[in-house]
Image (cartoon, rainbow, N blue to C red):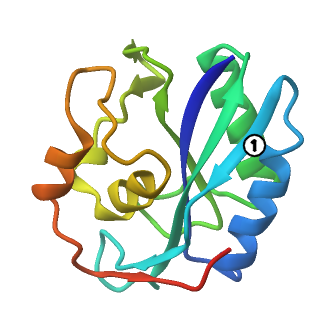
């Protein structure tokens, strides 16, 4: 089993409910156990004019291989009405593998640690709730990433 951190986000079709539904689906994946979930956060969209997102990070233990898990996450997204029309466009659900144990993965379909996580407070702050002081597989320290990525545009919502 590997500890995997998954970023969740939604800004369409009742985003909080989308995340709750996704967490229920994560808990039913084969060879995978849902371990913990961060608080939910409201965040500004990366593109102007979109509704705010609701984001969180989940920790799971999984014996699935990285691409198997990625395919399972895409299945959950599809089941919840995800359409891939526009990069960083509005979505019912986005599930990203942020970290996969101590592995560094550089595949065409999957980069781990997630390539953009160091720029995204809506990823770093929920991750820090679950794994304070962690060192990423590529050697970066979460505390250093947090220091370089201020808590701007985020609002911590009531607990899950």
| Image quadrant containing the C terminus | bottom right
Kind of element beneath mark 1? strand
Residue 52 rendering spot, x and y as whole percentages: 44, 83
Query: Is 83 placed above or below 62 here?
Result: below
Instruction: Give the quadrant of residue 102.
Output: top left
Query: Is 139 placed above or below 84 here?
Result: above
- The foreground one among 26 and 46 is 26
Q: Residues within 10 Å of mark 1 (few under 14, many from 20)?
A: some
Instruction: Give the quadrant of residue 131.
Output: top left
- The foreground one among 136 and 133 is 133
Position of 40 with respect to 134 (left or right) is right
Q: Determine the residue located farthest toward the front in the rendered image.
A: 133
Residue lying at 37% horizontally and 48% vertically, measured from the top left: 132
Residue 88 rendering spot, x and y as whole percentages: 40, 59
Residue 150 rendering spot, x and y as whole percentages: 16, 68
Q: Determine the residue located farthest toward the left in the rendered image.
A: 148
Q: Which residue is under mark 1?
A: 34
Residue 49 rendering spot, x and y as whole percentages: 35, 86
Query: Is 108 placed above or below 8 here?
Result: above
């Amino acid at each position: 089993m590997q500890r995997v951190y998954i970023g969740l986000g939604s800004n369409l079709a009742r985003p909080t409910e989308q995340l709750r539904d996704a967490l229920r689906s994560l808990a039913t994946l084969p060879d995978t156990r849902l371990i913990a979930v961060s608080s939910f956060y409201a965040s500004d969209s990366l593109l102007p004019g979109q509704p705010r997102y609701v984001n969180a990070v989940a920790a799971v233990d999984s014996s699935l291989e990285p691409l198997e898990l990625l395919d399972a996450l895409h299945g959950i997204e599809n089941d919840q009405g995800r359409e891939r029309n526009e990069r960083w466009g509005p979505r019912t659900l986005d599930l990203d593998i942020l970290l996969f144990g101590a592995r560094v993965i550089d595949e065409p379909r999957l980069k781990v640690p997630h390539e953009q996580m160091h720029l995204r407070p809506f990823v770093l702050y929920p991750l820090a709730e679950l794994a304070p002081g962690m060192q990423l597989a590529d050697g970066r320290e979460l505390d250093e990433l947090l220091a370089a990525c201020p808590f701007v545009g985020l609002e911590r919502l009531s607990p899950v």
